[in-house]
Amino acid sequence: LYREYDFIFCGDNGQGDLLAGQLMMEGPEEDRPIAILIHQVVDLEKSLTLDEKEPNTAALAAQGIFLHRTYVGAALALHRAFPKLMSVRQLQCVAECAQEDFDTSRIMYPEWTRKWEVYEEELSADLSAVGHLLAAAGLPLLRCLACTSTLIQQDEPFVRIFQLANAHSNSSSSGSDQESHAGYCCHHMAHSDEDVILKHPYLLDHLIEQD
């Protein structure tokens, strides 16, 4: 199907995606994907693979199968293997978007602080590697990734608005409350919080989407 196109297979090692990727790379050369990107979500020894022992990441990479912890890591692996496919500028864009998404997710769900700290360490490592490439290319460097506790403290009004929206979502799940989430939050927040919504318009979009 679509043999005239090149393609990349993406999956994770939680079930059989890594095994599927290995089988693809053992097929005829003209049918193989350019690369296999596998998000490592469980320990490698728990992965379903062709290997009798724990798979070797270097050996997998030599076959075009790249394991990653973050999507910045996935883009980084593509750049190193195929710099024409993933340029340094494109890598910079992926990294900046990942930072924005990660900050928003941490603010939306501050109760996951311990999990965020683990992900923060993994993302920071990949962002650091990207930073070295940007410096070598003479491109603007990435901003520093704020630690989770600092981010939540700095954006406390932002966090409070999300908590308010989620609380209202739970209380109105029966459908008896006709008031929109966005309206509810706007009625119950301080004036300083209104400035937060004006500063982050995607917050209002999020609140409206929940309605």
Image (spheres, helix red, strand yellow):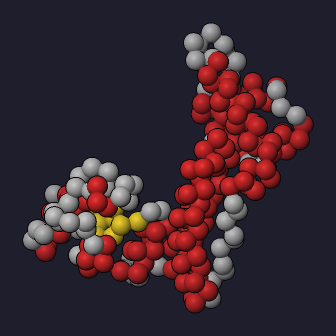
- Residue extending farthest top: 176
Looking at the image, which residue is at 65% across and 30% down?
A: 166
**115 to 133, vertically: above or below:** above
105 lies left or right of 50: right
**145 to 116, vertically: above or below:** below
Question: x and y percent of residue 88 in the render?
Answer: 51, 80
Question: x and y percent of residue 47 in the render?
Answer: 27, 56
- Specify the quadrant that holds the N terminus: bottom left
80 lies left or right of 203: left
Quadrant of residue 50 in the image? bottom left
The residue lying toward the viewer, choosing from 46 and 123, is 46
The residue lying toward the viewer, choosing from 80 and 6, is 80
Looking at the image, which residue is at 79% across and 30% down?
A: 186
Residue 34 shows in the view: no
Residue 84 shows in the view: yes
The residue lying toward the viewer, choosing from 100 and 200, is 100
Question: x and y percent of residue 51 in the render?
Answer: 17, 65
64 lies left or right of 107: left
Question: x and y percent of residue 11 in the render?
Answer: 32, 56
Quadrant of residue 137 in the image? bottom right
Quadrant of residue 78 in the image? bottom left
- Specify the quadrant that holds the C terminus: top right
- Residue extending farthest left: 28
Q: Number of labelled discs?
A: 0
142 lies left or right of 61: right
